[in-house]
Image (cartoon, rainbow, N blue to C red):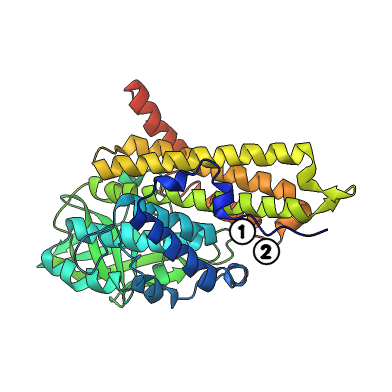
Amino acid sequence: MAQRPPATPAESDLLRIDDQLSPDERLVRDTVRAYTAERVMPSIADWFEAGILPRELVPELGKLGLLGMHLTGYGCAGMGPVAYGVACRELEAADSGVRSMVSVQGSLAMYPIWRYGSDAQKEEWLPRMAAGEAVGCFGLTEPDHGSDPASMKTHAEPNGTGWVLSGSKMWITNGTIADIAVVWARTPDGIRGFLVPRGARGFTARAIHKKMSLRASVTAELHFDSVKLPADAMLPGVSGLKGPLSCLTEARFGIIWGVTGAGRSCLEAAIAYSRTREQFGQPIGGFQLTQSKLAWMAADLQRAQLLALHIGRLKEAGTLRPEQVSLAKMANVRTAIDLARQARTILGANGITLEYPVIRHANNLESVLTYEGTEEIHALAVGQALTGISAYR
């Protein structure tokens, strides 16, 4: 029996949602898709199994203009929100770890410097970070304080003309390869952000190993043992939780789009497998139960893609609200996980091998479900928007 070629993104886009993209947005899509096909996909299973992400990818992504691509000036591409979302989608179709590295660099490390930093801080770091010559990380989560960042213990005390920073941060993407860490800490005047350079005395980063998710991603624990910082290490433009939470809203936007790429990859793998896997004398794609699974997977994916596009257009219009980001993040991540699990049932035992992308996406999405706001926290944000009552405490 002649075998049909694998499913393609165009085939899985039954509603032709990508027709709503502008020419520039389609160019971003095609450029990132071609890059991942050539540079990431041939090796990603090996990187995942080995628990590595090559550092040399960073300048390559910088050359493509993907680092801080939604920011303006300082060597950044200045692309619109939907173009950034499309890039995240195509990166995560390859692997969540690659998209996470780009999201952390642009939305969690560059964005706070770009929005809240001094002119000197922007000029020192942003051009190098946009080019991929310098890597950044974002330190908010602590070993004992994840969903409740207001209770953080990391603190910075005034010391003459500078600061002394002490504490620790946990689950920090890019931590051990970062040249600059954006660290949020308590001060006598409230929570403030600090730029802590690699090599600062008392600053150490330890890689977290034995992960079963986001293995093709650098994850670290950061320790600050009375790190002395100059006065100009502090971000002058914001105080309080508004600073880190605004950065997280930027990053969650990338997740809303990114997980549709992971879900699409799982659907495409399931379609392709159903065409070639034979049982009872015919391809399993010819059985009604399999077609029903694929049809509902396609419907769920298209809903998630439409939601991502709508959120993107709201952001372009400047009307996007945090609770809308929360709703879309919780909904799209859950959809992507369901797609991965359903695809695994179609692939059977082959679905748990790295020969196919399904189990890798499924494992990665378990992390995406809880990082940058757990499903429960986002549900409470949506619930408060609906009822006007806070249920956090």
Q: Quadrant of the C terminus?
A: top left
| Disc ID at residue 354 | 2
User: Residue 159 occupies which quadrant of the picture?
Assistant: bottom left
Residue 189 appears left or right of 10: left
State the count of labels.
2
Q: Is residue 4 visible?
A: yes
- Residue under the point 31% across and 22% down: 388
Residue at figure coordinates x 73%, y 46% from the top left: 345
Q: Quadrant of residue 391?
A: top left
Q: Residue furthest right?
A: 280
Question: CB under 8 Å between callouts 1 and 2?
Answer: yes
- The answer to whether 126 is drawn above or below residue 252 in the figure is below
Q: Is residue 298 left or right of residue 218?
A: right
Which quarter of the image is occupied by the N terminus? bottom right
Q: Position of residue 61 (x, y in %)?
A: 39, 70
Disc 2 packing (10 Å; few <14; some 14–19; many ≥20): some
Q: Residues within 10 Å of mark 1 (few under 14, many from 20)?
A: many
Q: Earlier in the sequence, mark 1 or mark 2?
A: 2
Residue situated in front as seen by the camera: 389 or 223: 389
Provide the residue designation for mark 1: 360
Image height of 214 relative to 389, above or below: below
- Going by the image, does 132 lie left or right of 363? left
Foreground of the two, 144 or 306: 306
**Amino acid of disc 2:** Leu
The amino acid beneath tag 1 is Arg
In what element is the residue under mark 2? Answer: loop
